[in-house]
Amino acid sequence: MKGKRIRVLVAKPGLDGHDKGAKVVAQALRDAGMEVVYTGLHQTIDQIVNAAIQEDADVIGLSILSGAHVPLCEKLMRRLGEENLSHIMVVVGGVIPERDVQKLRDMGIEGVFPGGTNFEEFIRFIRENVK
Amino acid sequence: MGGATYVKNERGEIEKVILQSGVKVKPVYGPEDLADLDYERDLGNPGEYPFTRGIHPGMYRMRPWTMRQYAGFGTPYETNERFKLLIAHGQTGLNVAFDLPTQLGLDSNDPLAEGEVGRVGMAVDTLRDFEIAFADIPLDKIGTGLTINAVASIILAMFQATAEKYGFALDKVSATPQNDILKEMVSRGNWIFPVGPSIRLIGDTIEYSAKVMPRTNPVSVCGYHIRESGCTPAQEIAYAFEIAMTYIDHVLQRGMDIDDFAPRISFNLDIFGNIFEQVGKFRAARRLWAKLLKERYKAKNPRSMWLRGLFGGGGGGLTKQQPLNNIVRGAYYALISALSGTQTMALCSYDEAYTIPTPQAAIISLRTMQILLEEMGLRDTVDPLGGSYYVESLTNQMEERITEEMEKVEKMGGMAHAVEMGYIQREVAKQAYLYEKALQEGEVHKVGVNIYSEGEDEEEVQLHEYKPAAAEAQISSLNEVRRTRDKRKVVSTLRDLEKAARKGENLMPYLLQSVRAYATMGEMTRVFKEVYGEFKEPSIF
C-alpha cells in the first residue's frame, strides 16, 4: 500500500439513524491521512457495494448500533464475494457485544471495533492489514 | 471529572475548569457575582414570570414528577405486557418505543425491514397493533409519550382511533408524540420527507390537536438527541429553541394565535456531564424561553411561556465498560433532573450501552427515581439551589452562551435552512469529534474508560434478547389484517388522502379515515412519498 492514500468508505447500513460514531470515525481517519467517503444514512447493502466500487475503496467500515450487525454483515460479505470484491477489507464498529465478535470474524470481517475503541487502535489496524 | 476540561499545575492542583459550553468556572463565587441580580426581573417566585425557579408555585409538593421509562419491543402483545409491568411498579407515564421500520414508515414485510422488525421498539403496521398495545391501559389517567417523528401524524391518528375505540373522551386523553423532524435530520436520522413538507405535517398535528385532542402535546422539541450526538449543553438549548420557533412560525402563518397552541409545546432535554452546568442550563432555558414567548411572540397566556419538559438521563453519559457504574450515574442524572425542576423524568438503563433494557434494568431505573422522590427530600422545597452564588452566576452565563448560539443559527438563515445545508450537522459532528479526542487524550475523565479502568474484564451483563419469531408473528398478523379488511375502503381513503395532500389541506382527518380502514403504515407513507418526495441528506464532509 506504500505511496497510495488508503481509501475508506464509512457506511451506515440498514435503518439505524445514529451516526455520531460513523462521523467521529470518519474525521479521525481523515486526520490520519486517509481518504474518507461517508455514505450517509439508510443505505442498503447493494448501495454500499456500489459505492465501494465507485469510490474504489480499499476498506469498508460499517457502523451499526441497532443490534442487526449479524444479518447485515452476512449480507455484505456475500455480496462482496459475488462481485469479486473480497480484496476489500471490511471492519465493523458500533454496539457489538463481545459474544458476536467471533461470529463476525468467521464471516471474514477483519476488524471489530466496539464503540469507545481508541482511534489509534483502528487506524493502526487498517494501515497494517489493508491489502 | 467528566463533563469539563481541567488544566492542572505542576503540583497536580486544578488551575482551570472549562465547562463544555465554554464557561470558565472560578474557584469561588460570592455576592459580587450577583451584584446585578434583580430577584423579580431575573428569577421571580416559582410559578411566576420569568419562571427561572420553576413553572409551578409548589412544584413537587403539588405533584411529583412523572416517571416515564422508554419501553417497547417486539410485537404489540409483548409491549403491552411491558407497559403493564411498568405501571404495576408505579410508573406514571408511558413512552412508547417503535421499531425502525415503523419510524421510517415501512411495513414489517418490506424487504428493507428485514432483521429490524420489533428490534429496538414495537412494530406497528396498522391500527390493529395499537389496539393490542393499549388494551387495558387507562389512557385517561396515564399520559402516553410516542417516540415517533417522520410519521407522527399517522401514529397520532392511530392513537386517536384507539382511544375512541376503547371509549375514552378525546378531551381526557393525553398523547405526546415526539414529532420533531428537524432534530431527526440533525442527529437521530429517522427522517423520510423533505424539510418543508415535514414541517407542514407537524403544523397539521398542532392545528388539529388543539381542536380535537386539547390535552395532547403535539410536539416535544428535542435538544436531547442533538446533545447526545455531540453538541454542547448551550448548543442543545439553542438548537432546540430555534427548532421550536421554526414550528411556531409555521403555525402562526396559518393564522393561529400563539396562545392557542404554544402552551402544548413541550421539550425533551438531555442530562449528562457536569451537575451545575446542567442545572444552570435548565434554569437559563426556562427564563429565556419565557422571555422569547413574551417578547418575540407577544404571548399573553403565562402557560405559553412555560418551558415544560422531560429532562432525561441520557445514554451518552453511560459506558459499556463497568456497566454497573451506570446505575450510579443514573442516580446522579435523576438528581440533576429534580434539582432542575423537570416535569417528567426518564433514565437510560444501565445495560443500554449494549441494547434495549431488560425488565430488571428498566425497574432499577424506575426505582432510582422513586428513591429520589420518596427518600431524599427533593419534594420538600422548590428550586433548592436558587440563590446560590455559583448556580445563579452560571445560570446567567449559560443564558448568554445559549443566546450566542441562537444568534449564529439565525445568521445562517434559521434552523430549517441551516439543517437543509448541513451546517448544524457539521457543527455537531465537529463537537463530537473534539469530545472523543479529549476523552482519548485524557483531558476529560470517564471512570472505567480512561481512569480507574485497570484490570477490569468485560463484565457479563444479562441482555435483552431479540427474537426473530416476533418478526414472523408480526408479519403474519399484518397479512391477516390485509386479508380481512375492506379493500375498497382502503383504496378510497388513500385516494382522498393523496388529493388532500396535493391540495395542501390539513391531513389529520384524512389520515384518521385511512387508519380506521386499517390502511398500513407503508401504504400511507407511500402516498406522502409520492406527493412530497424524500429528504436528501446534505453531504457534510
Image (spheres, rainbow, N blue to C red):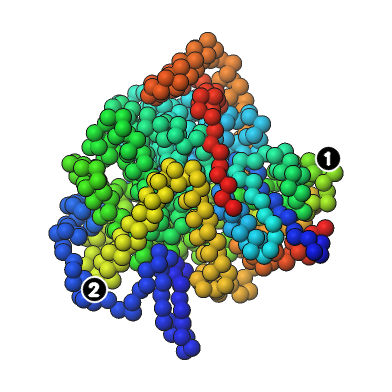
Q: Residue furthest right?
A: A84
In the rendered view, would you say A48 is above or below B278?
above
Chain letter for mark 1, please. A
Tell me if B377 is positioned left or right of B119 in this view: left
Chain letter for mark 2, please. B
Q: CA distance from mark 2 to mark 1?
A: 69 Å
Q: Residue furthest bottom?
A: B11
- Give amino acid for label 2: Asp
Report the residue marked by disc 2.
Answer: B33
Please report the residue visible at 63 percent of the width from the left and 34 percent of the height from the top: B113
- Residues flagged by tags 2 and 1 on a common chain: no
Query: Where residue B322 appears, x then y in whole percent?
Result: 56, 65
Q: Which mark is residue B221?
A: none
Q: Mark 1: few, some, or many residues within 10 Å (few <14, many ≥20)?
A: few
Report the residue marked by disc 1.
Answer: A82
Query: Where residue B183 appears, x then y in whole percent?
Result: 45, 45
